[in-house]
Amino acid sequence: MDLDLNDEQRLIQETARDFADNEIVPRARDSDRAARFDRELAQRLGDMGYLGAPVAEEYGGRGLDYVSYGLIVEEVGRGDSSARTVVSVQTSLVCGSIERWGTEEQKRHWLPRLCSGEALGCFGLSEADAGSDPSSMRSRARFENGHWRISGQKMWISLGNHAEVALIFAQTDPEKRHRGIACFLVPTSTEGFSSQEIHGKLGLRASDTASLALDDVELPEDALLGEVGDGFKIAMTALDSGRYSVAAGCVGICEGCVEASVDYAKQRKQFGVPIASFQLVQEMIAEMVMRRDAARLLVRRAGILKDQGKPNTAETSIAKLYATESAVECANLAIQVHGGSGYVDDYPVERYLRDARVTTLYEGTSQIQKLIIGRAATGINAMTPPRVDA
């Protein structure tokens, strides 16, 4: 497996780094303080082609490989995880699902506007009582008189208040559990659809997070994405891509922690010398460097496998698990290096910690990733409750 970047990938990485430094970093602290979703920045991400990087050019994307997409997400994540969330949701969850499962008409109607940033989309899978177990969702879809009718509620939906289209997962036959789930393209202007902003988040304060409500929403027959019963497969393939982007973004957090800590440690003096000369400070920086490099290589491996069209669910889960947990650890260490200065937002490290924490929860908790990895190693699915005979 060749882990080296080619010239085009290096140029993509450098361009994304410059964009993050010039467009994302200068806005990050103020947007975080104000808990303000920056729609203008989301549009700039679209202008750069970052909201549909792997999507085919004929549908408005850039047709990039997954390794290049990961490099973009890493740099955006280094700048601000709230901006990275826009890229991840729009590209991996929404655009990727429509491109893979949509009809030609659905793809041509939605993808160009989504890839350009003209429109935003959201991914309505999670519910208050259905997170790690989507088959227990309570949203219902029924087909009658040539139309679909959907009722239910969704929770923790990124971009839900600003999206023009929502991918909504609903159960058509509860007895079939995951085999009865269907996915629908729901214009958010449809009567009966509403959203409400979720306040008081620990991190990702500049990211829009919503609860969604669907009150007997009526949709045409062609609003169905894929076939009835495909919903679970659509969700799982989307999450495979989403976990990759979250992992890449967390490599960016690790990189940001290293950069901020090295700069601070070389400038800050105690006992007449830079604290970078202290052994235990170097130990903390070395730990961050090690975690950053290992996470980056695991993400790179997953991206290469995706580009080769090979199975990569376990490898993507390994990358997601290690990178997200490492981002939390690196941010915690970075605050320690900064001392009291790291506890306020004059430096980015306290935001890195707050933003990193949620990455171990969404798109599959760290515990779910371990079960996926364990299943791949043993061939036994621990997520299926064992049968108990009376």
Image: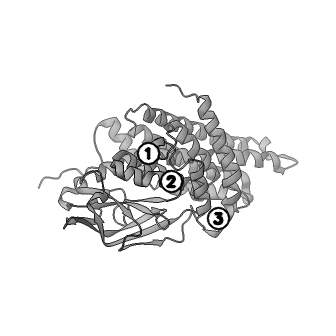
Give the residue drawn at x 52%, y 48%: 324
Quadrant location of residue 351?
bottom right
Q: Amino acid at mark 1?
A: Ser
- Please state which of residues 207 and 327 is positioned toward the viewer in this rendering: 207
Q: Is residue 143 left or right of residue 160?
A: left
Sequence-wise, the earlier of marks 1 and 2 is: 1
Q: Amino acid at mark 3?
A: Ser
Q: CA distance from mark 1 to mark 3?
A: 27 Å
Sequence-wise, the earlier of marks 3 and 2 is: 3
Q: How many marks?
A: 3
Q: Amino acid at mark 2?
A: Thr
**Picture disc at residue 31:** 3
Q: CA distance from mark 1 to mark 2?
A: 14 Å
Q: Which secondary structure lies at badge 1?
A: helix
Q: Which secondary structure lies at badge 3?
A: helix
- Please state which of residues 351 and 244 is positioned toward the viewer in this rendering: 244
Q: Where residue 243 sits in the image (x, y, percent)? A: 45, 47
Q: Residue 360: tell me if it is visible.
A: no
Q: CA distance from mark 3 to mark 2?
A: 20 Å
Which residue corresponds to mark 1? Answer: 241
